[in-house]
Image: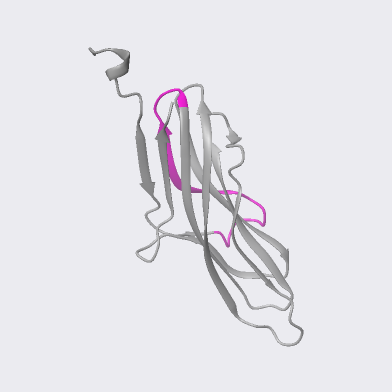
């Protein structure tokens, strides 16, 4: 490679979209699931990481309170990317009487600056948390209505 330091492009970027939805219903409450959406940060440096995570949650019981949370996970370090936790969607239905069928959809943005000391892989994980009641449906969506995505931009 030739050129001066001022003329070399030290920045890089990457983007990935989750190809299909992921059902969180079979995982235990509070257990984070690897969604299969990851990116390799190719060099040491400072990165802006951004994710959009679309979730859906539904119930058919009385007194339901449940949520889906997402986070970024540094696979190489085996640790959470600091400050990357986000509530994607929550359902809280405390009406008395007969059970009500509810289905809520929402999305959350995760935006963090992350310093990688070496090349690393970062992935998106999500968990369903049942506070009370029984969740009948819970998942991460990604289709033509809205994709769940992950991107990075190297900034230094």
* Lateral position of residue 59 relative to residue 123, left or right: right
Task: Specify the segment rendered in magenta.
Answer: 24-45
Instruction: State whether residue 50 is above or below residue 139.
Output: above
Where is residue 137 shown, x and y percent of the image? Answer: 57, 69
For image coordinates 64% across by 62% down, the residue present is: 67
Instruction: State whether residue 123 is above or below residue 108.
Output: above
Q: Residue furthest front?
A: 6
Q: Quadrant of residue 66?
A: bottom right
In the rendered view of the protein, which quadrant contains the C terminus?
A: top left
* Lateral position of residue 90 relative to residue 146, left or right: right
Q: Residue furthest bottom?
A: 97
Where is residue 4 shown, x and y percent of the image? Answer: 28, 12
For image coordinates 64% across by 51% down, the residue present is: 31
Q: Nearer the viewer, residue 115 or 21?
A: 115
In the rendered image, residue 27 lying in the magenta stretch gets the answer: yes
Instruction: State whether residue 143 is above or below residue 150.
Output: below
Res 152 seen here: yes
Q: Nearer the viewer, residue 2 or 32?
A: 2
For image coordinates 48% across by 28% down, the residue present is: 46
Instruction: State whether residue 41 is above or below residue 89.
Output: above
Q: Nearer the viewer, residue 26 or 75?
A: 75
């Amino acid at each position: 490679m030739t050129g001066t330091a001022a003329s070399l492009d030290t920045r890089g970027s990457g983007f990935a979209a989750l190809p299909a939805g992921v059902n969180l219903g079979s995982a235990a409450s509070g257990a984070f699931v690897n969604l299969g959406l990851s990116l390799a940060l190719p060099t040491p440096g400072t990165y802006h990481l951004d994710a959009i995570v679309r979730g859906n949650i539904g119930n058919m019981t009385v007194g339901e309170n449940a949520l889906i949370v997402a986070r970024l996970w540094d696979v190489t370090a085996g640790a959470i990317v600091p400050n990357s936790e986000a509530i994607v969607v929550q359902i809280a239905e405390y009406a008395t009487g007969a059970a009500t069928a509810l289905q809520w959809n929402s999305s959350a943005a995760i935006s963090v600056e992350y310093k990688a000391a070496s090349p690393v892989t970062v992935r998106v994980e999500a968990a369903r948390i049942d506070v009370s009641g029984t969740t009948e449906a819970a998942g991460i969506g990604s289709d033509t209505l809205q994709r769940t995505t992950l991107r990075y931009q190297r900034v230094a």
